[in-house]
């Protein structure tokens, strides 16, 4: 069965939105198969966001992702990668549709509440990155 990696980012944990975010995935009948509360290291984040290294927002992004605990989750289900990206909404919360997590709760382009894998390849790599 297909799997995807989701991270409830530090703003989501700080604002006590963990329950409401998980509810959206459970409502869609997606199954939580792994989950942990953890604080991410700079080394792991550099690896995870390697492809964004040249971007102007890279340092701000790493600082933010290290600013507090996150919840890392593996979800499983049919077409789960696409379904989760739809539930999450586009990167910028100002552009994200209402009814999506970022549209409803996201603060700005950096503090946008959740990460979700964007392809089968990324999902496989990210699940093994975060759960050895
Ligand atoms: N990001 C940012 N500024 C931008 C674009 C992205 O701070 O202009 C951050 C944001 O937290 C985003 C992450 O970098 O979630 C990864 O960017 P990506 O383009 O992969 O967006 P996503 O797949 O998360 O929608
Ligand atoms: Mg991405």
Image (cartoon, helix red, strand yellow):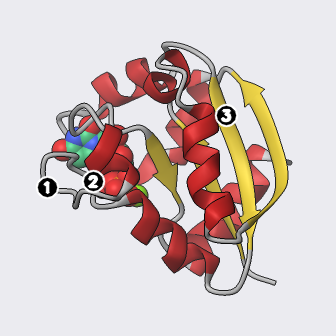
Calculate the distance from the C-alpha at mark 3 to the C-alpha at mark 1: 24 Å
Residue nearer the viewer, 53 or 127 = 127
| Residue identified by numbered label 1 | 95
- The foreground one among 113 and 17 is 17
Q: Position of residue 40 (x, y in %)?
A: 64, 25
- Regarding mark 3 in the picture, which secondary structure is present there? strand
Q: Determine the residue positioned at 30% across, 38% down.
A: 106
From this viewpoint, is residue 54 visible? Answer: no
Q: Is mark 2 within 8 Å of ligand 1?
A: yes
Name the residue carrying label 3.
Answer: 71
Give the Cα distance between marks 3 and 2. 19 Å
Rendered position, 20 above or below 124: above
Res 109 label: none
Q: At x 86% / y 48%, what residue is drawn?
A: 132
Report the number of discs: 3
* Mark 3 vs 1, N-terminal side: 3
User: Mark 2 or mark 3, which is nearer the start of the sequence?
Assistant: 3
Q: Which residue is mark 2?
A: 91
Picture quadrant of residue 43? top right
Secondary structure of residue under mark 1 = loop
Tags 2 and 1 in contact by the CB under 8 Å rule?
Answer: yes
The percent position of residue 81, horizontal first and vertical second, equals 57, 74
Q: Residue at x 74, y 56 (%)?
A: 74
Q: Quadrant of ligand 2?
A: bottom left
């Amino acid at each position: 069965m297909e799997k995807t990696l989701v991270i409830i980012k530090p703003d989501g944990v700080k604002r006590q939105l963990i329950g409401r975010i998980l509810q959206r995935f459970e409502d869609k009948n997606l199954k939580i198969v792994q989950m942990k509360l953890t604080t991410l290291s700079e080394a792991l984040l550099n690896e995870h966001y390697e492809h964004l290294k040249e971007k102007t927002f890279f340092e701000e992004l790493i600082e933010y992702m290290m600013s507090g605990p996150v919840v890392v989750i593996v979800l499983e289900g049919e077409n789960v990668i696409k379904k989760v990206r739809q539930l999450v909404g586009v990167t910028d919360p100002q552009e994200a549709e209402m009814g999506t997590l970022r549209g409803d709760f996201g603060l700005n382009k950096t503090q946008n509440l959740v990460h979700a894998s964007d392809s089968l390849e990324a999902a496989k790599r990210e699940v093994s990155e975060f759960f050895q």
